[in-house]
Image (cartoon, helix red, strand yellow):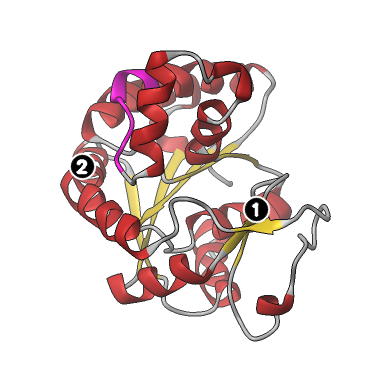
Amino acid sequence: MLPKVIFFMGLPGSGKGTQAEIVVDRYGFFHFDTGKELERKLHDPAEQHDPFIQRERENFDTGKLNTPEWVREVVKEKIREYAGQGKELVFSGSPRTRAEAEALFPVFGEIFGKENLVVFLLEVKEETSLFRNSNRRVCEKCRIPVVWNSTTEKWFFCPRCGGALVRRTLDNPEVIKKRFQEFHERTEPAITYLEEQGAVIVRVPGEDLPEVVAERVRIHLEGV
């Protein structure tokens, strides 16, 4: 039986969003992308006069993690909302800090049961991450990333919804390197905490093509 909540974690550019979307297409899960949720809120024109939002946007756009307490409240509210709708959830890149994991993991356990949670840790080298992030674009409408290759480099519009493909403020080499530091210092302790609490951590080699990585994920989920 499939879990009710799946987490994809790993370095920026490790394929978290891509693998989450494959799970959505294959199993009908709802993709809760914390980064996209925060990005939408932080760049919402209606929020731009709020000093707190201005500060958090500056953190986000320069590769720093946002205030954990604020992120926790945004995520907790959404978890309960989607659980109430009976949705199975897939997360990409969340929880981002140990404090966030400590606050959210009990909520997940309470709502879904610890036995229904699984964490996939996508393992890639930093140089792979740097190349992927420096060359990728995202759809400005649906925010789906497009992995760079000899075919997609000629694309200007999203193959899903037709939105324009753009580069994110996060995806420049200096910001990416800052995000590496943030991952090692703040996100790795969150993964350690989840493992200490008995969460199933599945380490998946992520250097290969997305479809190869997806097959490794499928084999674990389906047990075949």
* Residue extending farthest front: 49
- Residue toward you, 127 or 25: 127
**Left or right of 81, for residue 75:** left
Return the residue at label 1.
Answer: 144
Q: Earlier in the sequence, mark 2 or mark 1?
A: 1
Residue 205 vs 169, above or below: the answer is below
Question: Does dot 2 land on a helix, a strand or a loop?
Answer: helix
Position in image of residue 142 (x %, y %): 71, 45
- Residue toward you, 187 or 222: 187
* Residue extending farthest bottom: 150
Residue at figure coordinates x 25%, y 44% from the top left: 187
**Left or right of 166, for residue 41:** left
Question: Does dot 1 land on a helix, a strand or a loop?
Answer: loop
Residue 70 drawn in magenta: yes
Residue 29 vs 123, above or below: the answer is above
Look at label 2 and name its amino acid: Arg
Residue at figure coordinates x 19%, y 45% from the top left: 192
Position in image of residue 151 (x %, y %): 70, 83
**Left or right of 117, for residue 167:** right
Look at label 1 and name its amino acid: Ile
Residue at figure coordinates x 34%, y 28% from the top left: 105
Inspect this view and state whether residue 109 appears.
no
Specify the segment rendered in magenta.
Answer: 64-71
- Residue toward you, 3 or 213: 213
Return the residue at label 2.
Answer: 186
Position in image of residue 209 (x %, y %): 54, 78
